[in-house]
Image: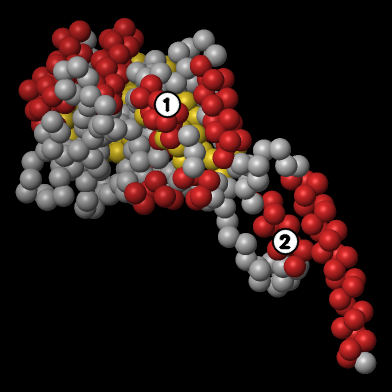
């Protein structure tokens, strides 16, 4: 008995202003293409059970284009795998705020799909010795998350947040109505737990997983990419799980559009010309990688310690060209932290000295590219020390 688990499709997701020749938002078209590829992969795997753990759409009222695409792709899935059980639960993006308002997901019930979008629902399939508890992300009381029917295979499908899995700022920006602790999942009593909401594929237990989203659609795309890289993941994907042998495989999906994080750097002490040169070199290095450079990619470059007056004088003609080439080129500039003379710079409560102050100012000052900053700072501090040696004895003599 093999199961495929996917989640967080976010069909209808839009970002940036670029349109396709047909007038569709380019990122919306990207996500639609990724979903079609995901359905291709599911059909090729031909599992006995397919579960979609929420957030089929990015909004409660998706566009007609997104609805039609979803209906066609789910229809293709059902026709290709007529003997497979398909279950969809609603996520927080699928769920209307008003309980009186119906969601769009019930449209897929016409295809023979079990759609659970209003309240937790047990699905019993005696002929397959299979029990599924489908729990949508809707406000209200949560059922006891234990199997209530004796079956050989027991599956929990749930869209919700397990506290601690999401970064705090992401959890606050995209809150799930359903908050469930690991203990409340009663993982040991289930053959498999299919979770949705967290966009990065992650293991909660050997038989409990967030499959992750199928494309980059979260409120923190770059943080998500960083988390994915740290986990050693090659991309987005879907999960195949054998309920009999407990064997698990993560199937990565090809990205519809590549995200590129250029190497960040600090502009502290750099002239406008030096910053421009560094940006150009980073883009050139990307162009030389043999994979099309920044063209049609989603690109970000973070520059730290960049004063406002330097940012204003950057080569904006070159930046406009980068933005024209990429689907989106984000120059994320971070201003220097202000020097706090009374802040701790050693022992708690220590006041910054005049030497600290002068060094900090000289290190952040914009210079012509032919000036040796280290030598300038060295000389300035030497002059300051010389001045103190002259003035302090004179002041002492005057006090006497």
Quarter in which the C terminus is drawn: bottom right
Q: CA distance from mark 1 to mark 2?
A: 37 Å
Quarter in which the N terminus is drawn: top left
In front of the other: 153 or 170: 170
Q: Is residue 215 visible?
A: yes
Task: Identify the residue at horizontal 43%, vertical 35% (top origin).
Answer: 316
Task: Identify the residue at horizontal 48%, vertical 34% (top origin).
Answer: 315
Task: Identify the residue at horizontal 71%, vertical 38% (top origin).
Answer: 370
The residue singled out by tag 2 in the image is: 358
- Residue 72 in percent (x, y) is at 14, 16
Q: Secondary structure at mark 1?
A: helix
Q: Secondary structure at mark 2?
A: helix
In front of the other: 289 or 97: 289
Which residue sits furthest bottom? 400
Res. 129 image quadrant: top left
- Residue 314 in percent (x, y) is at 49, 38
* Relative height, residue 266 to residue 126 (above, below): below
């Amino acid at each position: 008995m093999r199961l495929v688990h996917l989640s967080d499709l976010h069909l209808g997701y839009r970002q940036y202003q670029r349109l396709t020749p047909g007038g569709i938002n380019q990122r919306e078209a990207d996500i639609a293409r990724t979903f079609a590829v995901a359905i291709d992969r599911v059909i090729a795997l031909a599992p006995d059970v397919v579960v979609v753990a929420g957030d089929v759409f990015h909004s409660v009222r998706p566009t007609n284009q997104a609805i039609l695409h979803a209906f066609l792709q789910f229809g293709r899935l059902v026709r290709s795998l007529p003997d497979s059980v398909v279950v969809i639960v609603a996520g927080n993006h699928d769920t209307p705020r008003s309980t009186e308002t119906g969601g769009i997901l019930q449209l897929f019930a016409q295809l023979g799909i079990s759609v659970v979008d209003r309240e937790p629902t047990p699905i019993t399939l005696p002929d397959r010795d299979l029990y599924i508890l489908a729990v949508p992300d809707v406000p209200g009381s949560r059922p006891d998350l234990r199997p209530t029917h004796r079956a050989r295979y027991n599956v929990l499908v749930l869209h919700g947040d397990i506290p601690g899995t999401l970064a705090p700022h992401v959890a606050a920006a995209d809150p799930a109505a359903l908050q469930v602790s690991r203990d409340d999942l009663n993982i040991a009593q289930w053959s498999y737990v299919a979770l949705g909401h967290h966009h990065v594929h992650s293991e909660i237990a050997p038989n409990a997983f967030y499959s992750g989203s199928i494309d980059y659609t979260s409120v923190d795309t770059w943080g998500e990419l960083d988390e994915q890289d740290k986990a050693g993941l090659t991309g987005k994907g879907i999960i195949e799980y054998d309920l009999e042998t407990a064997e698990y495989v993560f199937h990565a999906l090809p990205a519809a559009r590549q995200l590129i994080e250029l190497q960040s750097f600090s502009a502290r002490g750099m002239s406008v010309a030096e910053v421009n040169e560094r940006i150009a070199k980073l883009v050139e290095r990307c162009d030389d990688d043999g994979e099309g450079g920044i063209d049609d990619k989603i690109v970000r470059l973070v520059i730290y310690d960049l004063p406002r007056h330097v940012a204003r004088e950057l080569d904006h003609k070159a930046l406009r060209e980068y933005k024209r080439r990429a689907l989106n080129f984000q120059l994320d500039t971070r201003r220097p932290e202000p020097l706090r003379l009374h802040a701790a710079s050693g022992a708690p409560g220590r006041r910054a000295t005049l030497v600290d102050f002068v060094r900090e100012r000289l290190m952040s000052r914009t210079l012509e590219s032919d000036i040796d900053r280290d030598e300038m700072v060295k000389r300035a501090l030497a002059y300051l020390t010389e001045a103190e040696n002259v003035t302090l004895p004179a002041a002492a003599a005057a006090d006497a």
